[in-house]
């Protein structure tokens, strides 16, 4: 029966320490919070997991603050929290722009940035922003805490370096120098899975990241180098098309993604006033 829950169990930690202990001692369990993806799998009858760890009540993981010069966002910060945060709006406005285009208000109220990262979907709209911003994923277990660059976090489609006894507890973003830019292309502006997402920082050290084009979010170092040397737009677009190596899937074709990515790069350069050779 689709969505049956009678054979499933739920652990309810009272603190992060409690949750990490349960993850270590009572596994395997699946961490859950906003459940915006998990409930879809439950509804379609494809959810095979039976034991879950509910993190939703751990308010200590909701903070958005400046810590050691970095923007620090707790894993349970929702998209609504991000949209409303003056600190995010000031330091990482492209993340607020991405959050505004994720689902409807109901999804924005429940979906969390930690869930978007841990879920490891290449179509996660915040991931290109975090990649372009050189963000770090803060992982914690009962024994230790470690920080992993988001660009090194994913090892393949829906796979990451996170261990079974670890939780994503925060995202940390160093100061971003340059103009920030974000665009999502999908069937609709929101409430649709993206066909392609581009996030960029345009300045002395350009950064460009793409989502929904490969098994994981990708950075484009050759394209970034082309922007840094102020070559021609056509040359930068050729490099981008070659470097991105997009996939064909149910949502779009590789050819479409290449064409749209090249157009997005041109729009980014124009919007940010970046000088390129004729």
Image (spheres, rainbow, N blue to C red):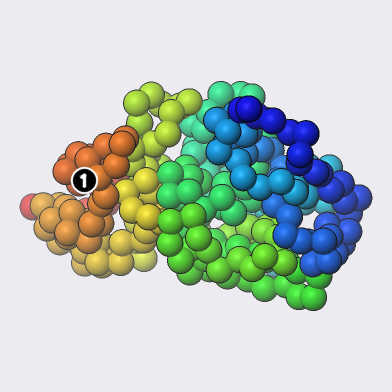
Of residues 116 and 84, the one drawn nearer to the viewer in this rendering: 116
Image position, residue 184 (x, y; %): 38, 37
Label 1: which residue? 254
As drawn, 119 above or below 256: below
As drawn, 16 above or below 44: below
With 2 as the anchor, is 245 left or right in this view? Answer: left
Of residues 68 and 133, the one drawn nearer to the viewer in this rendering: 133
Residue name at image x 73 percent, y 55 percent: 29
With 260 as the anchor, is 73 left or right in this view? Answer: right
Which residue is at the far front? 1
Which residue is at the far bottom? 143
With 195 as the anchor, is 74 left or right in this view? Answer: right
The image quarter in which residue 44 lies: top right
| Disc 1, SS | helix
- Would residue 85 be visible to someone looking at this image? no
Residue name at image x 38 percent, y 48 percent: 211
Image position, residue 99 (x, y; %): 54, 37
Image position, residue 236 (x, y; %): 17, 57
């Amino acid at each position: 029966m689709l969505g049956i829950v009678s054979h499933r169990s739920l652990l309810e930690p009272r603190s992060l320490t409690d949750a990490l202990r349960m993850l270590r001692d009572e596994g395997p369990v699946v961490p859950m919070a906003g459940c915006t993806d998990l409930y879809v799998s439950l509804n379609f009858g494809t959810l095979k997991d039976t034991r879950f760890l509910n993190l939703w009540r751990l308010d200590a993981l909701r903070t958005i603050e400046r810590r050691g010069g970095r923007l620090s966002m707790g894993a349970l910060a929702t998209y609504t929290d991000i949209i409303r945060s003056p600190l995010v709006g000031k330091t990482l406005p492209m993340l607020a722009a991405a959050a505004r285009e994720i689902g409807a208000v109901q999804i924005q109220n429940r979906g969390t940035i930690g869930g978007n990262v841990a879920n490891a979907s290449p179509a996660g709209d915040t991931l290109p922003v975090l990649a372009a911003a050189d963000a770090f994923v803060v992982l914690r277990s009962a024994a230790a805490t470690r920080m992993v660059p988001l660009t090194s976090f994913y090892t393949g489609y829906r796979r990451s370096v996170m261990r079974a006894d670890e939780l994503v507890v925060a995202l940390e973003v160093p100061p971003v120098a340059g103009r920030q830019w974000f665009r999502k292309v999908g069937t609709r502006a929101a409430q649709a899975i993206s066909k392609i997402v581009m996030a960029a920082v345009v300045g002395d050290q350009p950064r460009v990241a793409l989502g929904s084009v490969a098994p994981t979010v990708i950075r484009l170092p050759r394209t970034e180098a082309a922007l840094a040397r102020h070559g021609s737009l056509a040359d930068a677009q050729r490099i981008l098309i070659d470097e991105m190596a997009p996939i064909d899937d149910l949502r779009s074709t590789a050819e479409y993604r290449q064409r749209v990515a090249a157009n997005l790069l041109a729009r980014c350069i124009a919007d940010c006033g970046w000088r390129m050779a004729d």
